[in-house]
Image (cartoon, grey):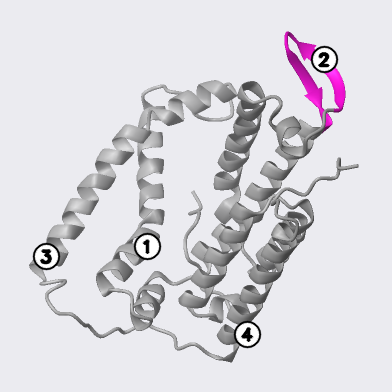
Amino acid sequence: MARILTYEEKDTWIHRLSGVTKLIFFLLWTLISMLSYDTRVLLSMVLGSLIIYKMSKIKWRQVGTVFMFILFFLVFNLIAIFVFSPYEGVNIYGSRTDIMHLFGGYFLTKEQLFYEFNVMIKYVTIVPAVFMFIITTNPSEFAASLNRIGVSYNVGYAVAITLRYIPDVQDDFTKIKHAQEARGIEMSGKASLFGRIKNIASIIFPLIFTSMERIDVVSNAMELRGFGKHKKRTWYAGKKLKRADYIVIGVIVVITVAALIITFHDGNRFYNPFMK
């Protein structure tokens, strides 16, 4: 089974950037997506995310499974929003345009559809950036880069180990899945969608216990080697910020400022096409 969400060395300008640069880009990109409900800004960011995703040469096999889970969660989330707040869009945009009556007190409105469309593209904006950050960043180099800008190397190592052990957690998931299938629990495409979700959910607890055991082993090994005794340490991996890094940081700062100005220029972060 192909590993997903794991670093893969490639010769692209994105891979050559410092881990710090990619972290700054990811944090500011996420900040814009979280704050803005301006459809014009979000659609521009979706286009930018797809371009960056394409330029990073990330293969579908590395992200396909995770993307499908995110898509399922997104659909579930949008349905939940409508069920519990069917007129949230009406309250936000200050108007109501009914499309059709569904059942009981539920009416489908243009305002609600537009609001949920914005929620959807907010997810679509962030997901490619997450994939790009994880798959194009060497965990060891990222830890060294964080330490170089003043972050404690203990924190840097924690982040690096998290990124490094994503493939190992996936391997554990695969082993547990195969063990469950050997016991007659169907997890392939032969089972129904909800049956597969239920059976896969049963893997979570064994996976948690396996991961906790690995954490304990790693923690003991690092403690026995005196990790954290000194205030500083040397690194065998690390990248200095180069011209391309400063350009990318400058561009994302400009984009952030411009996006926030466009979003809040009228004092409201919601773009309202229904305003008369």
Label pair 3/1, CB-CB below 8 angstroms: no
How many angstroms separate mark 3 from mark 2 (CA)?
63 Å
- Nearer-N-terminus badge (3/4): 3
Label pair 3/2, CB-CB below 8 angstroms: no
User: Which of label 1 and label 4 is nearer to you?
Assistant: 4
The answer to whether residue 101 is magenta is: yes
The three-letter code of the residue at mark 3 reads Glu
Q: In this rendering, does residue 189 appear at all? A: yes
Residue at image mark 4: 247
- Nearer-N-terminus badge (2/1): 2
How many angstroms separate mark 4 from mark 2 (CA)?
52 Å
User: Which of label 4 and label 2 is nearer to you?
Assistant: 2
Sort mark 2 into few (<14), some (14-19) or many (20+) by Cα contacts within 10 Å: few
At which x and y percent is residue 104? 73, 8
Label pair 1/4, CB-CB below 8 angstroms: no
At which x and y percent is residue 23? 49, 69
Residue at image mark 3: 223
Residue 187 drawn above or below residue 227: above
- Nearer-N-terminus badge (1/4): 1
How many angstroms separate mark 2 from mark 1 (CA)?
51 Å
38 vs 162, nearest the viewer: 38
Residue at image mark 1: 164
Residue at image mark 2: 101
